Structure formats: structure tokens, C-alpha cells
Amino acid sequence: MGNKELCGAPRFHFPECKFEKSQKRNAHIVLKYILPAAIIPTLVVAFLCILKFRKRKVINNSDVDQSGARWRRISYYDIQQATDRFNDGNLLVKVFILEQEGSFRSFNAECEILRKVHHRNLTKIISSCSKMDFKALILSYMLNGSLEKWLHSEHHGLSMIQRLNIMIDVAEAMDYLHNGGSVPIIHCDLKPSNILLDEDMVAHVTDFGIAKLLSGDDSITQTMNLATIGYMASEYGLEGTVSRQGDVYSYGILLMETFTQKKPTDEMFVGEFSIKRWVKISCPDSLHDIIDAKLLVAEGEPDTKQDCLLSIMTPALNCSAESPGERTNMNGVVVALKKIKRLLLN
Ligand SMILES: *[C@@H]1O[C@H](CO)[C@@H](O)[C@H](O)[C@H]1NC(C)=O
Ligand SMILES: *[C@@H]1O[C@H](CO)[C@@H](O)[C@H](O)[C@H]1NC(C)=O
Ligand SMILES: *[C@@H]1O[C@H](CO)[C@@H](O)[C@H](O)[C@H]1NC(C)=O
Ligand SMILES: CC(=O)N[C@H]1CO[C@H](CO)[C@@H](O)[C@@H]1O
């Protein structure tokens, strides 16, 4: 009421709208005020969009979840394909069987840890699927299988330098887990079947199903999970003590197995006579008797090889010392093995 500028339909008793005139004025207003007011925010928004678009292009085909992790989108069809044809494609689907006790727990543990780690020598998570009745992790598939296969099957053989490279990769991965992030991660189940080799024979540590995060300043924590007989340190087996030193112990055993080709669970090891003891009493004089025969027949300077093998057994024995306090740390192992590699290559 009282607004003289109002115009509209005659049935509402408004004065008729004079389009000609008001349009002109509108155009004037648009040019003078609205256009500049609109252009500036538009430019800003456009600029932001361009930035975002460029970023999106890089992470093409991936998705960002609430934790900020980037997952690649994978269809059920892809999963089906990868599950059916396990050796094909580049995906490995790890399905957690729900009936199995602790399966959910290990899915959660594995997700939590894989979300935190980014290292070339650890398996990479591509995506995950978590529903009430189906939980799966989609990992990149490692073409050359596990170290277990390479060490213990008839048709495979690794050279000295390949074994050394694999063990350096594993040591670097473990050093990263222990000391690389804000929260130390203890793997707890290091063994040959948990080391996967890609097409370039680069090793990737996998299976974080019973891994533990150390919180705060703690250097140890407790667990109820059982690791693998033969590879677990006695303090872990007896008291469930989880610490970096426990992983170091497993690594020492793994190092011995890699170069002797004997499993710590071999039937020749009974009671007090363990793989550690066997290696210890054979060094240095009867080293020849314990080394994987495939290594001795292969090409290369025998003396250098002998020296290197002896040098490798030193950190191996140190890592698997009975008392946790006497063991070296993973960084020490990386340094020692790299030195041996240089010796071997020269
Ligand atoms: C985007 O994804 C396609 C196939 O999904 C791939 O071939 C291409 O290399 C990707 N581009 C970038 C920039 O990652
Ligand atoms: C690893 O696997 C790839 C693909 O299967 C193969 O070409 C390569 O020879 C393997 N590496 C070794 C050392 O056998
Ligand atoms: C293992 O190495 C560490 C550091 O290099 C050393 O302090 C420790 O005494 C060694 N332990 C044994 C049993 O040789
Ligand atoms: C951090 C990192 O990438 N570590 C090693 C993983 O394995 C490759 C292949 O042996 C090494 O070149 C990397 O240094």
C-alpha cells in the first residue's frame, strides 16, 4: 500500500506495467551495479573451480572419503573378476570371512594401519568395501608372489643380490613402520609369506591383520593375538609383549631363512637346537654347510660371496638375540645391509 511504483495485473487494481521504460532502467541498473557485483565473485568461484578441477584431474578415478584417504572406485564387477581370476589384472581382493573369529577386528586393524602408511615397500590399499556382511580390502596385486614361494618351491631360485635387495626393502619398510610416522606401528607377523614381490622384484610387506599401534611414549604394549611359531620373539609368545624389538627378532629369523633356505620350523630344529643356534655354531667355520646350496653353485666370486654371507649372519644373529635389549634396531640393519650390498657389487 502506498507504493506507487508497483505495477501489475489490472484485476488487482494495479497500474499497468510500462515494460519499455522499466526494462531500460533495469538494464541501466544491471550495467552499473549488478554486473560488477556479480562478476567479481564469479571470477573468484571460477578460479577456485579451475584449481579444484586441476586437482581432480590428477586424482582422476579416485574418491575421497571422510578420513581424507583417496580410494579408487571399484565396481563389484571388478571385484568379481579379480576374485575369479586371481592371477589376472592388477588387483588383489582380500575378503575377510565373517564366520572366522577376529576377522572383523583384523579388517579394522588393517584398514587403520594401511590408512596411515605410505611407503613404496609396503602393500598399497586401492580401495575397501565394508558392509554388514561383507568386508574386503582391495590391494594392488603383486605379480611375482610371495618370498615364501621363491624360497621354498622347486622351480624358483633367487640370486644373492636379489635376496639382499629384498631384505633391504623389507628392512626399510620396517624402519618406516617403526620410526617413520607419528605413531610407531609394530607389524607382529613378519614372515616370508607376508612379503610380496612385484614385477620388478621389489619387496612389499603385507598383512597388517594383527599389527599394533604404539600410543604416546609407550615402547611396548600387550596383545592377545598369536603370531607365527618360529618367527615370534619369546617375550611375545610368553607374555604377549609387543615392541619394535619383537619385529626385529622376526626379521633376524627371516634373514637367516632367506640365505639358508631353512624354515625355523624345520624338523631338524628340536628343543634348544633352533635355527639361531645352528647359524651361530656354524659361523664362521662351517658357513658353507648352512647356506642355501643354490647360492653356492651360482655365478660370482666365491670369496666375496662367502664374506658377504658371513657379514649378513652378524646382523641376523644380533636381531634374534634372546634379550630384547641386546637387539639392534631396524635402522641399524638397513645401514649394515646396504654396506654389504656395496661390498658385493664391488
Ligand atoms: C585417468 O584414468 C584413466 C583410466 O581410468 C587413465 O588411463 C589415465 O592415465 C588417468 N589420467 C591421469 C592423469 O591419471
Ligand atoms: C617377475 O614377474 C614378471 C611377470 O610375471 C616376470 O616377467 C619376471 O621375469 C619375474 N621376475 C623374475 C626375477 O623372475
Ligand atoms: C647388536 O647391535 C647393537 C647395536 O649395533 C649393540 O648395541 C648390541 O650389543 C648388539 N647385540 C649383540 C647381541 O651383539
Ligand atoms: C622409500 C623407498 O622407496 N624404499 C625402497 C623401496 O624399494 C625400492 C626398490 O628396491 C628402493 O629403491 C627404495 O629405496
Image (cartoon, rainbow, N blue to C red):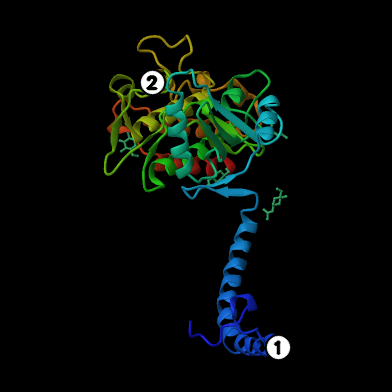
Residue 54: x and y in percent read: 63, 63
Q: How many marks?
A: 2
Q: Quadrant of residue 336?
A: top left
The residue where tag 2 is placed is: 226
Name the residue rendered at 36%, 30% in the picture: 246
| Image-based side of 278 in relation to 23, left or right | left
Density class for disc 1 (Cα within 10 Å; few <14, some 14-19, many ≥20) is few
Q: Amino acid at mark 2?
A: Leu
User: Looking at the picture, does residue 171 appear above or below residue 54?
Assistant: above
Density class for disc 2 (Cα within 10 Å; few <14, some 14-19, many ≥20) is few
Q: Is residue 195 or residue 287 the one in the foreground? A: 195
> Which quarter of the figure is the C terminus placed in?
top right
User: Looking at the picture, does residue 19 appear above or below residue 227?
Assistant: below
Q: How far is mark 1 from mark 2, CA to CA?
A: 86 Å
The residue where tag 1 is placed is: 20
Q: Is residue 27 or residue 209 the one in the foreground? A: 27
Q: Upstream in the sequence, badge 1 or badge 2?
A: 1
| Residue 331 appears in the rendering | yes
Q: Is residue 338 or residue 8 the one in the foreground? A: 8
Residue 294: x and y in percent read: 62, 23
Q: Amino acid at mark 1?
A: Glu
Residue 115: x and y in percent read: 47, 43
Q: Quadrant of residue 23?
A: bottom right
| Residue 259 appears in the rendering | no
- Mark 1 or 2: the one toward you: 1
Name the residue rendered at 46%, 24% in the picture: 103
Can you tell me whether the CB of the residue at mark 2 lies under 8 Å from the nearest atom of ligand 3?
no
Label 1 SS? helix
- Residue 101 is labelled as none
Name the residue rendered at 63%, 86% in the picture: 26
Label 2 SS? loop
